[in-house]
Amino acid sequence: SQTIHQWPATLVQPVGSPLSLECTVEGTSNPNLYWYRQAAGRGLQLLFYSVGIGQISSEVPQNLSASRPQDRQFILSSKKLLLSDSGFYLCAWANRAFYGYTFGSGTRLTVV
Amino acid sequence: GQNIDQPTEMTATEGAIVQINCTYQTSGFNGLFWYQQHAGEAPTFLSYNVLDGLEEKGRFSSFLSRSKGYSYLLLKELQMKDSASYLCAVRDGAGGGNKLTFGTGTQLKVEL
């Protein structure tokens, strides 16, 4: 069966510090991968998605970047965090037939 | 682009039935999903509609009318554990990637 791992679960970082969140999927090949952010009391906002290694599409101009160095690995990064980067970050995967997403457990990021 | 509307909050009584509505406007509709999200957790898949009509899955049912841009999620025999946010999401198959655009969610509170 397929599983998705996302870490860390919580993170408190100072303004101006770098960020690296990692997501890996097991039990499937060539998945579509997604990064979403959910700000407090708000909906899910798609940040990036990837259909293959090295292929990244950005949905919203921002202070973040994403990379897919391996088929089942998706990384969200920032060089310098802003207060507005605080939120609940969710990684998700979907297969090519697309019957919806399976989400990772999420990372709650607080920038102080 | 996508525009998705759903009520912000609803309250219902344990054992009752509740209907959560969702309306959408989209340029490339390719299916509608419902997710459940408990506080502090990742969303989990509930249902998927791509054709008009009702899909039933245990205590949960979802209905779609593509001509009206309308869906609802029906929860029967409500339990306290059903207190959660319910997210309506529309699939955009255009442009590759199979992305989901989410509504802001309906916070359901189940009371005794």
Image (cartoon, rainbow, N blue to C red):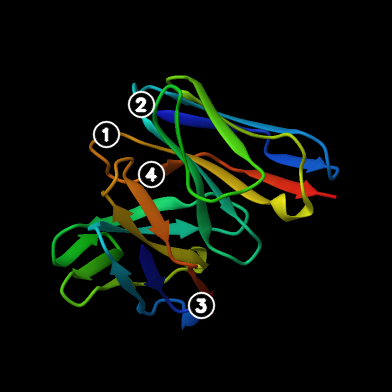
Q: Residues within 10 Å of mark 1 (few under 14, many from 20)?
A: some
Residue A49, disc = none
Name the subunit of mark 3.
B
**Which residue lies at the image location 52% right of the left edge and 57% below the top edge?**
A44
**How many angstroms separate mark 4 from mark 2 (CA)?**
15 Å
Name the subunit of mark 2.
A
Residue B8, disc = 3
Q: Position of residue B76 (x, y in %)?
A: 33, 72
On screen, B34 above or below A64? below
Residue A1, disc = 2
Would you say B91 lies left or right of A102 here?
left
Q: Position of residue B32 (x, y in %)?
A: 28, 60
**How many angstroms separate mark 2 from mark 1 (CA)?**
16 Å
**How many angstroms separate mark 3 from mark 2 (CA)?**
35 Å
**Which residue lies at the image location 46% right of the left edge and 77% below the top edge?**
B14
Amino acid type for the residue under numbered disc 2: Ser
Q: Position of residue A7 (x, y in %)?
A: 64, 32
Asked if both marks, 4 and 2, belong to the same chain, the answer given is yes
The residue labelled by disc 1 is A96
Mark 4 or mark 2, earlier in chain: 2
